[in-house]
Image (cartoon, coloured by chain):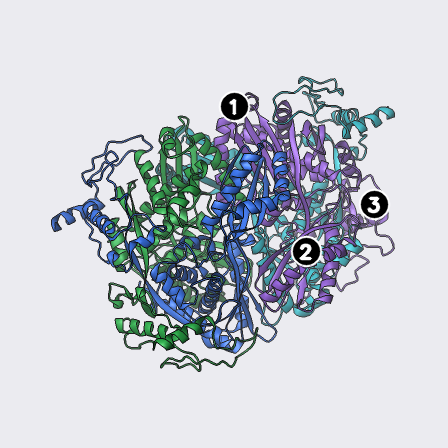
Chain colours: A blue, B green, C purple, D cyan
Amino acid sequence: MKKKSARRNKAASKPKITAPKLASGQKERTITNKSTEALDGTRTMIPRSKENNYTNEMAAKRREFIKEMTGVEVKHLANYSFDPQILKNNLENFFGVAQIPVGLAGPLLVNGEYAKGEFYVPLATTEGTLVASYNRGMRLSRQCGGIITTVVDAAMNRAPVFCFESAREARKFGQWLKDNFPEIKSKAEATDPFCRLKLIEQYAVGKLLYTRFDYVTGDAAGQNMVGKATFAVCEWLKSIIPDIKQYYLSGNIDTDKKHSFMNSLHTRGKRVIAEVTIPNEAYVSISKTITHEMFRFRNIANTGAILAGSNNNGQHAANGITAMFIACGMDVANVAESSAALLYSDLLPDGSYYYSITIPSLIVGTYGGGTALPTQTECRKILGCVGKDTANKLAEIVAATVLCGEISLGAAIIGKDWVSSHEKYGRNF
Amino acid sequence: MKKKSARRNKAASKPKITAPKLASGQKERTITNKSTEALDGTRTMIPRSKENNYTNEMAAKRREFIKEMTGVEVKHLANYSFDPQILKNNLENFFGVAQIPVGLAGPLLVNGEYAKGEFYVPLATTEGTLVASYNRGMRLSRQCGGIITTVVDAAMNRAPVFCFESAREARKFGQWLKDNFPEIKSKAEATDPFCRLKLIEQYAVGKLLYTRFDYVTGDAAGQNMVGKATFAVCEWLKSIIPDIKQYYLSGNIDTDKKHSFMNSLHTRGKRVIAEVTIPNEAYVSISKTITHEMFRFRNIANTGAILAGSNNNGQHAANGITAMFIACGMDVANVAESSAALLYSDLLPDGSYYYSITIPSLIVGTYGGGTALPTQTECRKILGCVGKDTANKLAEIVAATVLCGEISLGAAIIGKDWVSSHEKYGRNF
Amino acid sequence: MKKKSARRNKAASKPKITAPKLASGQKERTITNKSTEALDGTRTMIPRSKENNYTNEMAAKRREFIKEMTGVEVKHLANYSFDPQILKNNLENFFGVAQIPVGLAGPLLVNGEYAKGEFYVPLATTEGTLVASYNRGMRLSRQCGGIITTVVDAAMNRAPVFCFESAREARKFGQWLKDNFPEIKSKAEATDPFCRLKLIEQYAVGKLLYTRFDYVTGDAAGQNMVGKATFAVCEWLKSIIPDIKQYYLSGNIDTDKKHSFMNSLHTRGKRVIAEVTIPNEAYVSISKTITHEMFRFRNIANTGAILAGSNNNGQHAANGITAMFIACGMDVANVAESSAALLYSDLLPDGSYYYSITIPSLIVGTYGGGTALPTQTECRKILGCVGKDTANKLAEIVAATVLCGEISLGAAIIGKDWVSSHEKYGRNF
Amino acid sequence: MKKKSARRNKAASKPKITAPKLASGQKERTITNKSTEALDGTRTMIPRSKENNYTNEMAAKRREFIKEMTGVEVKHLANYSFDPQILKNNLENFFGVAQIPVGLAGPLLVNGEYAKGEFYVPLATTEGTLVASYNRGMRLSRQCGGIITTVVDAAMNRAPVFCFESAREARKFGQWLKDNFPEIKSKAEATDPFCRLKLIEQYAVGKLLYTRFDYVTGDAAGQNMVGKATFAVCEWLKSIIPDIKQYYLSGNIDTDKKHSFMNSLHTRGKRVIAEVTIPNEAYVSISKTITHEMFRFRNIANTGAILAGSNNNGQHAANGITAMFIACGMDVANVAESSAALLYSDLLPDGSYYYSITIPSLIVGTYGGGTALPTQTECRKILGCVGKDTANKLAEIVAATVLCGEISLGAAIIGKDWVSSHEKYGRNF
């Protein structure tokens, strides 16, 4: 068996198949590795059970299959502590778990409307110094009275585009949407008890009407909920308005799993703001510089962000967001849109530094998706974010955490201890 | 003890502390929960060992501390299968692991320059239907001869900004940088054997010179490597060029953990292209429509992307990228920049559909960071991406996977089976 | 005198003054050229009359001053055909007119809601081939039934930003704005009989509330009208809401005389769409290619626009817009925002080509500004755009003209007769 | 005749033709107005002479035609002071001139490398207060030692896209371009004695290679020059490299007559910087506030620009640029790209305010295009910008003027005298 493994392993890097030529049609292939379930021509299919695919047995079978096909013996991935049945709405072809190390930062003092008090924040990351750096920001902000957090808006979007014969028909339809909003709203909301349609944005382009349906979705992040609701509305519209030649459930302005200006302007997920005011003396305690210099640098950083065409004029919001998303069971792919931010600061007359971050498309939920999985639930429990009406609380804690990271890295860039810190704590290369 | 836990748990959601007032200075706080290591005034510090902080004991102590402070008993997080010593350069204050379920998709047929043959791809995600959807794209692309992948560029960037008295001094310095590139290059490369400085981009703004140092970094993603190298160069420059009034190691055009136009134009990480040509008949087999209609929709999706100001005119590159990043030990926060993409397609005269995705800032590495962790290594072994000269291979497999996801979701949007699929496999809300 | 002129002329290029050093304070200067009205230290002031500055005499005096100071005898500029009194609200220090040559294109067949029928379009430009090229597009579009135009939205914006102590106060104020919209509207509209406040957009960033007041302004472009109205509202708000620490009449999201995504999304000026459907045979008559190829190229041009981060995925809307703006008395600086556009096309099943341009921030007016000047009025008369309710008509004609230019240049790029045309008609270099 | 005119005039607003229906093919039309040269079916063509179309007679004939067709008697447009022969490379179908009033501002003290000394600047505009406002900035900047200007880069671009079978072929071609740059350069430069090819930028997207050829073009703006040169190169490349399936002379990343991030990053036209340092006392003299407050506002204006996705974080660069472009014979449509700018300021330790504007795509030339026309030449003579090696000088004066406008309007926004000034000098509505 060992010998076979070695052979397979080699196979993985130097495959036996003949690489197909460019832009060609069907190719002949010499595939020697075959599982017993190879159903599709030469295609060696991953083991799957039609009865129950979410079992330890099937997971093991797939690990065995991996060994068979690639020679790789998967052990650590097999080290999970739950019944695969719980994954039915989360994952197909389960065969193990990725173990992402989680560190603890805190206490983070949050003065929010939902999150109030001190929190110890689980951060799942493999970037050395990150937990230490966030921790430094938490310590400083706590000295300054904590981070004030405010959720100022919320929306989950699905953006169908409707195609007409002409711009005028599109405009007429746009007016119809406005006139009939209550009925549309009722159709949409009938699909889910937590679904609330707030607004239908409209953008006219040629004979197309791009729309963006904005919902609130309770504690769920809500992408599927709003997809289902909008689909129901669209099918109904299509059935009663013959002018609609065609529609697509997404005209690409949602913009799901992607950054866009539209998201930053109009909110996707939560629009949450974290603020703190740091007296100059406090700032000096973690930095080699003063707030006045920090403010001058802010101007340079803003100009750089404009020059680069960046979606974030701060430093590294994505770090804190991602680490919390992984730990807490968020859809991590939403880092794409959640990583946008507006950092705004102000040098107050007394020399203290007002620091704020506005995250306009922070996609968090405490219900649905991966939120119910075991370690994810534990991490959210640590934050008191399990159960009803906790999504805004989680949004506030994420934003507060992000701001602590901005404070810390901002000071490091100014103070030049950035590289040396990474040398000490970070990856040694 | 149990009773105490319950009390603490309550404390987490209804904290006893007096919330500080807005924008105030130091506050009085009534913190009743104290660990034995409370050193900083009222601040209850997370247990830490100065001798060796990376042990099972310290991890357990921190889990105990969590229980103490929040009442939450952490069990699943404790289910890790490695020695915490390995985390020394990856994480501070380790107390457990997040278990992210991993599914298998494939076979994915890749016709790359580094990745050749069939691969079974581990995807760590909690979004139902995702693995199934990528799998569908892999099946179709395999029928069409597989995905052709090409790494066309690579760069890791650190972007110091230099401050002068005037634009002319900045320009003079810019010329100096060009004239002395070989010496600068040698200073930079002396800091690490894998570090190669390719180019220093320059952008003049007022009295500032924004620069962007572009490196290749072997198999490492290389953010720390280039930070160290650029810092060495900057300190040297500062010491010999008195005109430099000040510099900052990042002028915010790197743009690290953030999307920017600059990244999409000039590459950050790997610039990798995946391509496939799908005959109309093959396309029809997974879709309710034809390639001609797909091409019309592409135009609508492009227009939507332009309208929204999106960083990606495709569908959902972030999904595949994130799922592979988590599984394979990449820095997942880099989804912020890695999620940008350009989808370009073409309807060929014979009705077949040329489909490509260009990912301009795909940040992957197979050395350093979190790559050496156990499950992460196993996942990359499955792909044959462990060891020297495997970073480009991994980039190619990621890009091929992403394209399969585009094919599949694109067909779903057109064919309207999107919502129903999520209803079947996805989260049930 | 001649001799003196020559000397002065030389002075202009080789000045006698000592160039001040960098970043210094007040400098000594040796200015030898002095007018009799030098009032401000060594500063030689331009002749000005406190009684009546808008006379032929003062214009002549200033031309004489120019000769005195620079040696340049201004003759052609003096060739104006109106009484300078008319310039009282348009220009200070008048001394002559620029003569911009105007060519005629047409007939342009417009099937608008305001513009109906055939128009001959005055284009003020110095770019050879431009009139010919627009003319070609007009001929083709006329064969295809003319250009359909639709004004789908209108707004003129002034965007005050309000500063508070915290995000929550800003949010509270935002709610107040919504609750008290009728009163705000009435305050705003009291400043001008044509001013109608439609909406106050709100964007929360930290402790700031950026707002954007959207008005309709009758036949005027309306920048000054909305400035005045918004200023009145702001001063009133400041007087009654003590939470407002400060406000600025523009927080830079208006965005006046600048392109922005916000303008393209939310309209500034008119949002106007021009459409035409070109049968393949008709298209072939002006092009060396077919509509199918044109559609393939559209995809490439869209991808290029996305890649470049362009504010216009079409070809050259600015050409037609600028030429009409100069001719017709628009504020030409608004080309900055008016030049943004979305070109959307579609290849119809019968091979004909649907072509549309959406101009989201076309700033036109037929009242106020430079509209009443003589040649400007004549040009608008040619278009039937003088008098009440003609602004939308003008917007439609501009959009129709722009689309003709897109058709023509698009065909040229595909057909490669672009350069040769410029060689024939254009500037011979 | 008069009676007829009146009738025609009416005709212009209420046309006799039957408006064609939507999206239809060829229509029947009832056109009653016919010139004697109606050649194209019912199309009433504008009078044109094949022998010599650039004569006073033909201009008069066209004015007569306008009267015939629309009833409008064109008089002021006929008031030109040059021989139409000079328009051969500038305009087709000439029938008159737009008279744009020109005011004088100054003295503007410029401390440039090409522009040195005091200038009186002709501004062609119809926006009241504009000349006065620029004048105010000129007065203040002169007190502070004048505006320092620096041209830091120059490029005129033409951006062909090359289409291949695959990304790898595109990459191979990209390498070929690098390897054969000297020969390509020589082919390009053979087309014009002033044409110098600096660089070919490359951007890989799928099977396409977008390129951007960057030239310097002497004193000409150079759009046609680089079009011709690049076309020659492309045709040659197409003839010797069979892998090129197709190319288009513009892949839409030039980006001509359009703003783009690419232009702002990589320069189109001149990249020119204007700077001045204003002591607090000097600033106070024109403003109701102090430099410290100005700096705080800068941060708000920057944040607004980022929020709006604006191409200019300053105030109104387009105003000064447009007014000078019209006066001096620039291609005014280039305001589209020239209006982008980066405003960077700094609050110096002594309280003085460093102010700079960086215009990255200022398209100016003093040769070719409309530069030789009479009033245009006079205006440039006033600035000493006629003759060889004057394009950079003109660029510097434009940038210095723009900065004066920023200073003045910036102070007005802060000081709230903005609206009242427009009330005094501006358009009275």
Q: Which residue is mark 3?
A: C86
- Amino acid type of disc 2? Gly
Q: CA distance from mark 1 to mark 3?
A: 55 Å
> How far from the left and from the top, in percent, is residue A369?
40, 54
Q: Using the rendered image, report if marks 2 and 1 lie on a common chain.
A: no
Q: Is A369 situated above or below D260? A: below
What is the quadrant of the N terminus of chain B in the image?
bottom left
Q: Nearer the viewer, residue C80 or C200?
A: C200
The quadrant holding residue D275 is: bottom right
| Horizontal side, residue A98 vs residue C423: left or right | left
Q: Nearer the viewer, residue A179 or D112?
A: A179
Q: Is C114 situated above or below A407? A: above
| Horizontal side, residue D406 vs residue D192: left or right | right
Q: Earlier in the sequence, mark 1 or mark 3?
A: 3
Q: Which residue is mark 2?
A: D405
Q: Is C56 situated above or below D249? A: below
> How far from the left and from the top, in percent, is residue A366?
44, 59
Q: Which residue is mark 1?
A: C350
Q: Is D156 situated above or below D238? A: below
- Amino acid type of disc 1? Asp
Label 2, residues with CA under 10 Å away: few <14, some 14-19, many ≥20: many
Q: Chain of mark 1?
A: C
Q: CA distance from mark 2 to mark 3?
A: 24 Å
Discs 1, 3 touching: Cβ within 8 Å: no
Q: Chain of mark 3?
A: C
Q: CA distance from mark 2 to mark 1?
A: 54 Å
Label annotation for residue A272:
none
